[in-house]
Image (tube, grey):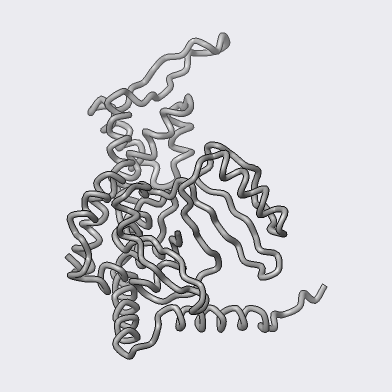
Amino acid sequence: MLIGGFALPAYGQNRTTQDVDLAIATSYEKAVELQVHLHKTGYQLGSQPNLEAPFFFVTDLKEMLEVEMWMKPDGVIFDADLLRRRVKVRPFNDSFEMFAIGPEDFIVNKLARKDRGVQDEQDAISVLAKQKGKLDYSYLKKRANKADVIGLLETLMQKSHTN
Amino acid sequence: MLQTDLAATILSYCIKTDLTVTELTRKVSGNHDKTMALIKELEERSLLIREISRRHSVGRPRQYLRTTPLGRQFLSEYNRLHDISLRCNENDVRKALHQAELAQRLDASGISPYERFQEVNEIARNITRTAKTKQNPR
């Protein structure tokens, strides 16, 4: 499932991005298998498998594109609620369809990032503004509460008049 | 630097290392008198205490500043509040709202956001690839 900059055009602003962020709900063992497989098919591994790491990244050497695989994306809980809110997108061409994280979980993920910066907050604002009135606000607040970013979310909504 | 920020800096220094008043004032850049006054205030509020160390056998026993459990509590609350402060300023918020408005106009014109996303990224990649940067003369 797409998260980050590649998921953003589905419900927020359009901006350039350097890498693809993917959330993968998988066990550590399966993630290692995936890394081995990607390595065999020509991807360069960014780091050694690590049980504690929230993500690993690989680089497509042909396209020089970095792909971050998030096993534990910040503030994201892999459950039925999250899966129900995924949106189908066609990021590359019409023949290839995939899932992107839902807009509410996208916002929480951006705000819960440990290295949260201006860009992350701007991404969240753009979704709040573009989807104003269409978001599931009780779900958004429930998830923000769980991720411990409810104060941040409410301040951001107040400042951007998206509440 | 706000008085609270300076207080938090002092308290965090005095958790990690043994520092005398002189060492601390040297470590904390800025106005010396202001730092001294704040140290005194933190002591009065029991957030910071002085401890005498006799580890050095030679010379007078040294006095170190220590953050008290109350000081640690202050620091943890300060860090929590610092984490939830926005990184965006007014201008950043305005820019993000403008970008959302542009994206809305794109939708209204029937242009696929991913089509535009691909174009924008393609253009950015081409600019990076073709940019002529100055060569290092050496």
A98 in relation to B55, above or below:
below
Position of residue A23 measured from the top left corner of the image (x, y, whole percent): 46, 54
Image vertical order of residue A3 relative to residue B61, above or below: below
Residue B90 in the image: above or below residue A107: below
Quarter occupied by the C terminus of chain B = bottom right
Residue nearest the observer in this picture, A114 or A25: A25
Number of numbered discs visible in the structure rendering: 0
Tell me what residue is drawn at x 30 percent, y 37 percent: B38
Tell which residue pokes out farthest to the right in this image: B138
Q: At x 69% / y 56%, what residue is drawn?
A: A44
Between residues A29 and A127, which one lies in front from this camera angle?
A29
Outermost front residue: A95
- What residue appears at the point 46 percent right and 70 percent down from the top-left corner? A97
Is residue B5 or residue A114 the one in the foreground?
A114
Q: Is residue A157 visible?
A: yes
Residue B3 visible, this angle: no
Image location (x, y in percent) of residue B29? 45, 45
Q: Position of residue A126 (x, y in %)?
A: 31, 71
Residue B122: percent from left, percent from top: 56, 81
Q: Is residue B81 left or right of residue A7?
A: left
Residue extending furthest toward the bottom:
B109
Quadrant in the picture for residue B36: top left
Q: Residue at x 33, y 41 (%)?
A: B79
Q: Is residue A82 left or right of residue A158?
A: right
